[in-house]
Image (spheres, coloured by chain):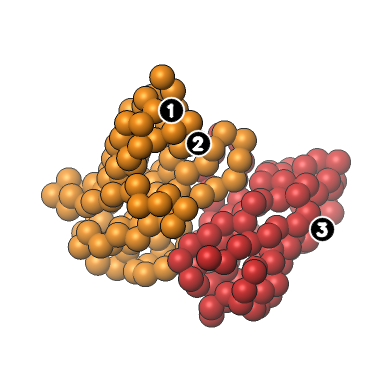
Chain colours: A orange, B red
């Protein structure tokens, strides 16, 4: 089970911060990676980034280095910081588990949290 | 980056009919690492197929995936009322990218 927590509303040029909390014992396993996917209103899915158990991250090139991801194993959480947001970053943000270590499909998803960028 | 193109954009069918959805990649997908997801309004996507042809846990056998290289297909053999939704393909052979989606709607 994954649960997203986010700010709801972020001002343009500021940083979007979002946390994903994982329940169950899979977070402590090195056999899984964790990811963030977003979906602008009425549009398709876009991969944002992926983080592994040790904190190594991979991010979409389309986000031009604005992404930082981290893990907190003591809290079974991983997090996203997206800098310099614009209206184009308005989306539902989903946390998800990759099916295995490395590049893999997303087999478990959170319910998603809507983040709007507006002044 | 591998670009995935899904067709058609919308498929209008009746319950009981067969649905055939296409996903074409801009370059060959390594090891056929291609997945399919179903998304209903207001819900998160659900994994249906991985590795091009393997059904995920608890997915009914009316869903099947096929293809290799750059051309992949999701087939729903007989549409049930709950199958009307948007379907996305995703490749994970080289980083991660999603297709634009195909909406299966009731005719």
Specify the label residue A88 is tagged with.
Answer: 2
Foreground of the two, A67 or A91: A67
Instruction: Tell which subunit mark 3 falls on.
Output: B
Identify the subunit bearing mark 2: A
Contact check, label 1 and label 2, Cβ < 8 Å? yes
Labels 1 and 2: the sequence-earlier one = 2
Q: Which mark is residue B18?
A: 3
Tags 3 and 1 on a common chain: no
Q: Residue at x 84, y 54 (%)?
A: B17
Asked if badges 1 and 2 are on one and the same chain, I answer yes
Q: Which residue is mark 1?
A: A117
Residue B98, given in percent of the width and then of the height, sits at 56, 57
Please identify, in this view, whether the residue under mark 3 or under mark 1 is nearer the observer.
1
Q: Mark 1 and mark 3 in contact (Cβ < 8 Å)?
A: no
Q: Secondary structure at mark 1?
A: strand
Between marks 3 and 2 in the image, the one whose residue lies nearer the viewer: 2
Nearer to the camera, B101 or B55: B101
Residue A105 position, x and y percent, is 47, 62
User: Could you tell me residue A13's position as x and y percent?
Assistant: 36, 31
Quick one: label 3, few (<14), some, or many (20+) residues within 10 Å?
some
């Amino acid at each position: 089970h994954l649960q997203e927590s986010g700010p709801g509303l972020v001002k343009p040029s500021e940083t979007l911060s979002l946390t994903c909390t994982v329940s169950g014992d899979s977070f402590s396993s090195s056999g899984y990676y964790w990811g963030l996917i977003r979906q602008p209103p009425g549009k398709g899915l876009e991969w944002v980034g992926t983080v592994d158990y040790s904190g190594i991250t991979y991010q979409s090139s389309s986000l031009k280095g604005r992404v930082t991801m981290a893990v907190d194993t003591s809290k079974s959480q991983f997090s996203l910081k997206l800098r310099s947001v614009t209206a184009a970053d308005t989306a539902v943000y989903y946390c998800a588990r990759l099916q295995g270590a490395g590049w893999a499909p997303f087999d478990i998803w959170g319910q998603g949290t809507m983040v709007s960028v507006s002044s | 980056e591998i670009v995935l193109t899904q067709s058609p954009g919308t498929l209008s069918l009746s319950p009981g009919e067969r649905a055939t959805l296409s996903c074409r990649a801009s370059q060959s997908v390594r090891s056929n690492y291609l997945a399919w997801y179903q998304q209903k309004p207001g819900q998160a996507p659900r994994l249906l197929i991985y590795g091009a042809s393997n059904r995920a846990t608890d997915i009914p056998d009316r869903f099947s995936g096929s293809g290799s290289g750059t051309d992949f297909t999701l087939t729903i053999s007989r549409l049930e009322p709950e199958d009307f939704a948007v379907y996305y393909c995703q490749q994970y052979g080289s980083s991660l990218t999603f297709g634009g989606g195909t909406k299966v709607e009731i005719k």
